[in-house]
Image (cartoon, rainbow, N blue to C red):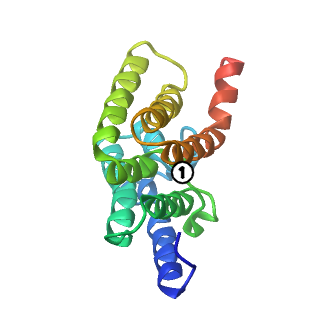
Amino acid sequence: MPELDFPLLARLVFCFLLGSIPFAVVAMAGTGIDIRKVGSGNPGFNNVLRVSKTRAILTLIGDMGKGILAVWLCLRPGDLVLLGWVYGFVTVLGHCYTPWLGFSGGKGVATSGGVMLMLYPKWALVALAFFAVVRIGGNRRKWKEAGAIASIATWVVFTGLMLALVGWREAGVAALMTLFLTWRHQQNFRNLLAGR
């Protein structure tokens, strides 16, 4: 990993600020609805989906786009892919702890999906296809917390792909992201266990 010099620090700050744009709130502009006060109260794709499919798609594009754009703009030719993970993590942290919403925010799944797609497009497409199948199937079967189940299961699958097909370092970083996202979804899993 490179030393923490000014250009690297500037890129990290950029990633955090890019990640901090609350697209769920932006997508709901003009509706009179504060997405933080409806549904789960979470300013993210799954909560916007409860209100409007069209605005949920805009949220998804914005949130995934943050992860893609941060890695694409900051990762230089010749940089280690692990540095791309660092940029991705910082972008996800910006999303989850945005200063524009009092350092609270979404749960980081869509943004982390953008990071995944930028760093490992082939394996990310496999994982995202898995997400779509589980999410749609969960909705049809009326699973409680279908979004949380599909999201974490997808990152577990992606971590397995990294371990089997890429390498243990990449799998280790993917596992860290999986653990972080699981921690961000702890209330969802509490609700699931409590039958709510």
Image quarter for residue 164? Answer: top left
Instruction: Identify the residue at the far top of this view.
Output: 141
The residue that appears at 62% across and 32% down in the rendered structure is 188
Which percent across, then down, holds residue 149? Answer: 52, 27
Q: Is residue 135 visible?
A: yes
Q: Is residue 29 visible?
A: no
Secondary structure beneath label 1: loop
Taking 62 as reference, is 122 above or below it? above
Taking 19 as reference, is 44 above or below it? above
Which percent across, then down, holds residue 61? Answer: 31, 52
Image side of residue 51 versus residue 92, left or right:
left
Between 194 and 149, the residue placed more toward the observer is 149
Which percent across, then down, holds residue 124? Answer: 34, 41
**Total residue callouts:** 1
Taking 92 as reference, is 56 above or below it? above
Instruction: Identify the residue at the far bottom of this view.
Output: 6
| Residue that carries the numbered disc 1 in the rendered image | 106
The three-letter code of the residue at mark 1 reads Gly
Which percent across, then down, holds residue 194? Answer: 71, 20
Between 88 and 195, the residue placed more toward the observer is 88
Image side of residue 57 versus residue 148, left or right:
left
Q: Residues within 10 Å of mark 1 (few under 14, many from 20)?
A: many
The residue that appears at 53% across and 69% down in the rendered structure is 1
Which quadrant would the C terminus be assigned to in this image? top right
Between 77 and 178, the residue placed more toward the observer is 77
Between 138 and 153, the residue placed more toward the observer is 153
